[in-house]
Amino acid sequence: MTFLLHRWMKTCEIGILFPGNLQMRQLIARQKRWVQIPGLRTLWLNWDYPVFAHDPLWKRLAKPVISRATRVDAGAFGSLVSRGARGAITVRNEDRIPENLPRWDGGFGLKLSEGADYLNWRFDTALDYVRYRLFSVWVAGSRCGAVVLAEWPHCVVVSYCDGDDPDDLAGGVLLAIAEVNQGEHRYRKVLLSAIHARMRKAFERAGFRPDPVETPFYMASFGDQSVPESDGDWLLNLEFGDAGAMFGLVYTGP
């Protein structure tokens, strides 16, 4: 598998890697070609404080109480989303990513954009192990972004988003989360990733807590193009590398 990955990466100008375990990170860190990109964080909403067997009794009793007292009603995010520069931000639930999806080239220093064919294959709404929810983001009657959520009974993952403007897109992500976290699900766990400084601030204002440790993210040059430098204005989605599906299927806490 490692050999096939290595051969495949050499067919690209730039390699991107999200090492998912300590051994992989240690291996990549020894390679001079791979450059660690700073600033990527996973942000958590309503995730429990884990209780460990070695915790003292008072801590084991206090953690569930603190978790409940600090819960955020994600169904009320609509009241936090202010009007964008061009007007009110709204979202619409879609069955499929439209074939004529616009190409959004502005607003971000770097992002990984894919066409509608790939997105509809990657986020197939008919899968049985995850329910993908597709949303379009609109401002002043114009489609300005797209959001894909992965939904399980215990949590929601922001799998993918793309758009013209970071502030409008962050508002669209929050509105999409509010759409699926209504009623009995309004305190459901949510997680997402962000490297863009303004988008991170918008999510933190909504109650998301950033992981204290940066999410490992590496890039390498396999051609003439050099590895770009991040100015805190990139757009990176959690499900590049299937990390989002792993969180939803396996983990119940940070």
Image (cartoon, rainbow, N blue to C red):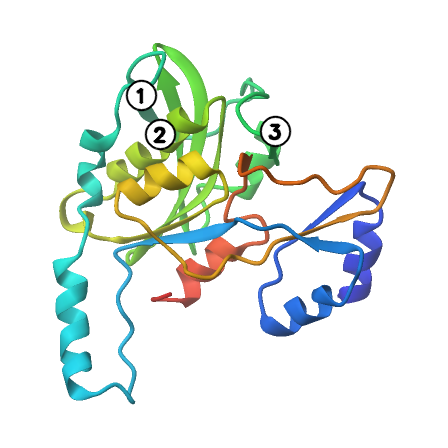
Mark before the other along the chain sequence, 3 or 1: 1
* Mark 1: secondary structure: strand
Q: What residue sits 61% from the left and 29% below the top?
A: 115
Mark 2 vs mark 1, CA separation in Å: 7 Å
Mark 3 Cα-neighbour bin, 10 Å: few <14, some 14–19, many ≥20: some
Front-most of residues 67 and 95: 67
Q: Amino acid at mark 1?
A: Ile
x and y percentages locating residue 41 in the rendered image: 47, 52
Q: What residue sits 82% from the left and 37% below the top?
A: 225
* Mark 3: secondary structure: loop
Q: Are marks 2 and 1 in contact (CB under 8 Å)?
A: yes
Q: Is residue 8 above or below residue 61?
A: above
Q: Quadrant of residue 25?
A: bottom right
Mark before the other along the chain sequence, 2 or 1: 1
Q: Amino acid at mark 2?
A: Gly
Q: Is residue 213 above or below residue 139?
A: below
Q: Which mark is residue 172?
A: 2
Front-most of residues 152 and 80: 80
Mark before the other along the chain sequence, 3 or 2: 3
Q: Is residue 135 left or right of residue 161?
A: left
Q: Which mark is residue 89?
A: 1
Mark 1 Cα-neighbour bin, 10 Å: few <14, some 14–19, many ≥20: many
